[in-house]
């Protein structure tokens, strides 16, 4: 019996559960099978939450629940070529189309020795016991509807291990392409990143979609940062306007680890990005920032939850966005400081610019402090572009549209200020500049 | 700096600070059986000689409440944990015996009652009043006295108990009762609508500036009794009123329920300033006893250029659930909320405000200071909502929390919703302990540690304290001192 606070759904992909999918993998098949079945059952019993559930207050899964989604079909090679040829290439990359690994287009093997990449369906490399434990933890079923669908219907499971002490200069790119041609399709990519001790690396996730019909890409990414490791993790979400994007990223940080996250949310009809970081080891640093550009009927919901569970940790959250036409932008940020922790420092800021009379921006910055020795702040500002600044630029002969673009660009660029990587700042500042003129009407 | 054990001792010392209003008055009281049902509601209505429409209104509220109760719709979203309230295990009406006829003058009031208020520092005998504050004293379920009535009458101001207003000014009550907080608003407001026993009513006529502060003093005396009062204030065009509210209760081992509703209505160019010093019994240092305070307060700035300002100092109650709000309906209207919430021992407070901007050029300002000590939990929960047509509206919110001791919690849960692109919202919040540098600075100048803490906490609260009317500012400052004196090591 589905609770009254949940939606009833009738997705046809639920009937195409593949019992034998991971039969031949090296990983503990019995465990995986059990967890997948448990996840399927959980979803059948609970379906999707409605806005009555507090954390879904600003994001309505109603539209998704009313549609029917099937599993994706195999894509022809020629079509794949077409999909991939236009994409920029920043370095070693993994291409995933509709949740399946495309080895032909991926060149991760160039990092052999520094990085291990496993995909459950075809990889036969052994995995260290300690990493196996993390993987098992990630693949355990739980009481979350979206994670349950993902685990039950992921077509493959990807594991990226950055080896102990390895310092990678070039970013590793994960390109997630979703495509539907006939039916509405639900895609469930699942990625696990393990950053071993003292390793340093950068991962860029790109999400793109091509679809005539509705597409639902439902991502789950689990990340572990072992002692003294550093990971820069960026995501460029640029899916089409027929795509629903839901994503859950969970980070576990051990002692003295450093995690930097940057999200540029530009696409999808409705997108929900959840980032949940647990600072389990002392002296860890977690920096989560990003921006969103939304227009037309887009809805972007970003939910960040940073949990200080150990002493002397530092966290920052910074999200800026601009909303035009009928768009709706939401930022929900949470800082939790656990009992008994000392010397915690946490800051959070979110700012939004409303560009049209029908767009709206909401924020819910939450502090949940159970320890005394803390310094926590949060700030929010939501408003229109500064008229005086526009006047200043216009009085110097700059046309209105250009003036507004300049102001939005400089406003958003602030989110990249503290990102400690010239390469990433360059990539994303160019992307941001390009998208502003494409996205907003501004006249 | 003192070490941790010293610090604990100080916290303990503060925690054991006696609640000075904890006495009870030995008065014979009249009350019907425990529990809530239609009969009790009819009894209350009959006691107050109410017209039929009001009884029907109450019964409608009761049927709503019953439905909500049966479908377990008691609000559970607040960060509060307490034992479930047994609504059938409390008295819903209690009046000092012999108060059937409301006293014509203070000479008719039971001297014991007057003595109680003297003890509380609320002199009801007019000749003794120096500050010139008109007081309506509510004792358990009934209003026992209202002072300065004649003086106020000269200005056309109505200030009386709610039950008296129902008899004398029924049209006004019928027009405005439930217009800001409707019967079905929320679980506790609905319960209050069914069972409210008395309260205060204020009407300020057009263009009148109320010459003195008006005040209601609420006192729960009887054991196992809930207090459900209702306050309705109407400020007609161009008028001004400053209203104060104070509350205390005896120390008892059981938890007593207080569920009040306050409705404010400000018409064109009117201003209402509503200040509260809430000092219900907070329970003992082990969290036993104390008042459960579930209050719905809402003001409607109905007219253009109207203003409603809420100021509250919340130091009492075991559990506080309270969100004084403003509906900014008129163009250019202003809403303000200034709050200090202090929790100690096992107290829990979930309090904040709602500012709903509907009219154009509306402004709101929220300043909230939360102080949490002992094992207490203190939450600020607020909503700022600018609707689509509220052009050029503005909100500024600041909520700061101070933590004293490592067993308490401070939480901030603001909801910020902007649907208008010509409007601006700014929100900022901080949470920290009293900084060692600040303490050191004071100590260096020869100020004792306790005084230094008092100084810093007072500074922390200053923005709110200065908003209080003179009469309350002193009491509030003392309360802040009592609650937190020397609690940091």
Image: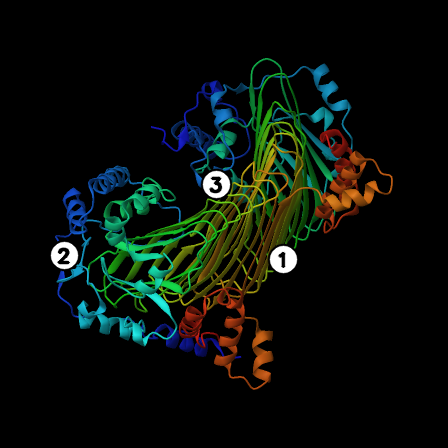
Name the residue located 72 percent from the left edge and 51 percent from the top edge. A418
Q: Secondary structure at mark 1?
A: loop
Bin the neighbour count of mark 1 within 10 Å (Cα to Cα): few under 14, some 14-19, many 20 and up. many
- Secondary structure category for the residue under label 2: loop
Looking at the picture, does residue B101 appear above or below residue A58?
below
Residue B474 location, x and y as percent? 43, 73
Q: How is the image coloured?
A: rainbow
Front tag of 1 and 3: 3
| Vertical order, A317 against A26 (above or below) | below
Q: Residues within 10 Å of mark 2 (few under 14, many from 20)?
A: some
Same-chain check, marks 2 and 1: no
**In the displayed structure, does residue A372 sit left or right of residue B217?**
right
Locate residue A352, reporting x and y percent: 64, 43
> Marks 2 and 3: CB-CB under 8 Å?
no
Residue that numbered label 3 is attached to: A55
According to the picture, the residue beneath numbered tag 1 turns out to be A256
Question: Between B5 and B397, which is closer to the camera in this rendering?
Answer: B397
Instruction: For marks 2 and 3, give the one nearer the viewer.
Output: 2
Question: Which residue position holds label 2?
Answer: B31
Residue B404 versus residue A426 in the image, above or below = below
């Amino acid at each position: 019996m589905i609770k009254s606070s949940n939606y009833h759904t009738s997705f046809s992909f639920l009937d195409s559960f593949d019992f034998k999918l991971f039969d031949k993998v090296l990983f503990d098949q019995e465990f995986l099978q059990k967890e997948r079945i448990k996840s399927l059952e959980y979803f059948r019993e609970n379906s999707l939450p409605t806005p009555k559930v507090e954390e879904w207050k600003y994001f309505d899964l109603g539209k998704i629940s009313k549609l029917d989604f099937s599993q994706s079909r195999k894509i022809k090679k020629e079509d794949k070529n077409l999909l991939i040829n236009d994409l920029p290439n920043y370095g070693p990359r993994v291409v995933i189309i509709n949740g399946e690994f495309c080895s032909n287009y991926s060149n991760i093997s160039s990092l052999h020795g520094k990085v291990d990449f496993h995909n459950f369906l075809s990889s036969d490399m052994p995995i260290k016991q300690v990493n196996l434990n993390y993987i098992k933890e990630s693949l355990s079923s739980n009481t979350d509807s979206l994670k349950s669908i993902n685990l039950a219907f992921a077509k493959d499971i990807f594991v990226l291990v950055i080896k102990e002490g390895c310092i990678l200069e070039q970013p590793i790119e994960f390109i997630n392409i979703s495509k539907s041609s006939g039916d509405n399709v639900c895609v469930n990519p699942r990625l696990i990143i393990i950053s071993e001790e003292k390793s340093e690396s950068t991962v860029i996730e790109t999400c793109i979609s091509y679809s005539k019909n509705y597409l639902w890409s439902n991502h789950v990414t689990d990340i572990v940062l072992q002692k003294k490791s550093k990971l820069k993790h960026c995501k460029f979400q640029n899916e089409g306007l027929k795509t629903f994007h839901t994503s859950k990223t969970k980070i576990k940080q051990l002692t003295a680890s450093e995690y930097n996250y940057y999200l540029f949310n530009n696409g999808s009809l409705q997108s929900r990005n959840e980032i949940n970081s647990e600072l389990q080891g002392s002296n860890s640093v977690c920096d989560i920032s990003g921006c969103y550009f939304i227009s037309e009927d887009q809805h972007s919901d970003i939910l960040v939850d940073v949990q200080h569970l150990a002493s002397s940790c530092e966290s920052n959250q910074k999200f800026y966005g601009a909303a035009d036409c009928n768009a709706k932008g939401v930022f929900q940020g949470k800082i939790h400081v656990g009992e008994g922790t000392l010397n915690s420092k946490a800051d959070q800021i979110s700012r939004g610019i409303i560009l049209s009379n029908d767009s709206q921006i909401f924020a819910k910055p939450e502090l949940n402090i159970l320890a005394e020795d803390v310094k926590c702040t949060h700030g929010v500002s939501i408003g229109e572009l500064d008229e005086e600044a526009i006047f200043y630029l216009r009085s110097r002969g700059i046309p209105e549209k250009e003036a507004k673009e300049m102001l939005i660009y400089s406003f958003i660029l602030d989110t990249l200020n503290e990102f400690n990587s010239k390469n990433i700042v360059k990539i994303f500042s160019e992307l941001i500049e390009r998208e502003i003129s494409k996205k907003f009407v501004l006249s | 700096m003192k070490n941790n054990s010293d610090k604990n001792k100080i916290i303990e010392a503060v925690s054991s600070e006696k609640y000075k209003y904890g006495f009870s008055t030995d008065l014979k009281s009249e009350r019907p059986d425990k529990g809530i049902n239609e009969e009790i509601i009819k009894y209350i209505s009959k006691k107050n000689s109410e017209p039929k429409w009001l009884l029907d209104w109450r019964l409608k509220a009761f049927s709503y409440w019953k439905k909500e109760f049966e479908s377990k719709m008691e609000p559970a979203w607040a960060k509060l944990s307490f034992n479930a309230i047994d609504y059938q295990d409390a008295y819903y009406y209690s009046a000092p015996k012999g108060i059937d006829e409301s006293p014509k003058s203070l000479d008719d009031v039971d001297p014991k009652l007057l003595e109680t208020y003297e003890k509380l520092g609320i002199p009801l005998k007019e000749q003794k009043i120096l500050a010139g504050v008109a007081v309506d004293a509510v004792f358990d379920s009934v209003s026992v006295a209202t002072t300065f009535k004649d003086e106020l009458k000269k200005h056309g101001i109505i200030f009386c108990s709610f039950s008296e207003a129902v008899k004398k000014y029924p049209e006004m009550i019928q027009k405005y009762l439930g217009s800001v907080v409707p019967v079905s608003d929320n679980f506790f407001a609905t319960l209050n609508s069914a069972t409210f026993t008395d309260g205060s009513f204020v009407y300020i006529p057009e263009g009148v500036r109320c010459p003195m502060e008006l005040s209601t003093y609420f006192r729960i005396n009887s054991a196992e009794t809930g207090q459900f009062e209702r306050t309705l204030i109407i400020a007609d065009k161009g008028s001004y009123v400053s209203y104060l509210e104070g509350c205390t209760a005896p120390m008892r081992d059981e938890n007593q329920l207080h569920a009040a509703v306050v409705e404010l209505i400000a018409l064109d160019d009117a201003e209402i300033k509503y200040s509260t010093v809430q000092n219900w019994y907070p329970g003992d240092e082990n969290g036993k006893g104390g008042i459960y305070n579930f209050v719905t307060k809402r003001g409607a700035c109905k007219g253009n250029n109207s203003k409603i300002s809420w100021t509250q100092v919340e130091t009492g109650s075991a559990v506080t659930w309270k969100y004084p709000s403003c509906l900014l309906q008129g163009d250019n209207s202003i809403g303000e909320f200034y709050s200090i919430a202090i929790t100690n021992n096992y107290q829990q407070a979930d309090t904040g405000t709602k500012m709903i901007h509907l009219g154009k050029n509306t402004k709101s300002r929220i300043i909230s200071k939360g102080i949490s000590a002992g094992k207490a939990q203190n939450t600020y929960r607020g909503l700022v909502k600018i609707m689509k047509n509220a052009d050029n509206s503005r909100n500024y919110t600041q909520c700061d929390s101070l933590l004293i001791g490592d067993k308490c919690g401070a939480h901030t849960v603001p909801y910020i919703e902007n649907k208008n692109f010509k409007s601006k919202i700014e929100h900022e919040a901080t949470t920290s302990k009293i900084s060692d540098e600040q303490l050191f600075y004071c100590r260096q100048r020869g100020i004792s540690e306790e005084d230094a803490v008092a100084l810093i906490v007072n500074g922390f609260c200053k923005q709110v304290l200065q908003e209080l009317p003179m009469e309350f500012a002193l009491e509030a400052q003392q309360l802040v001192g009592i609650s937190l004196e020397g609690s940091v090591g």
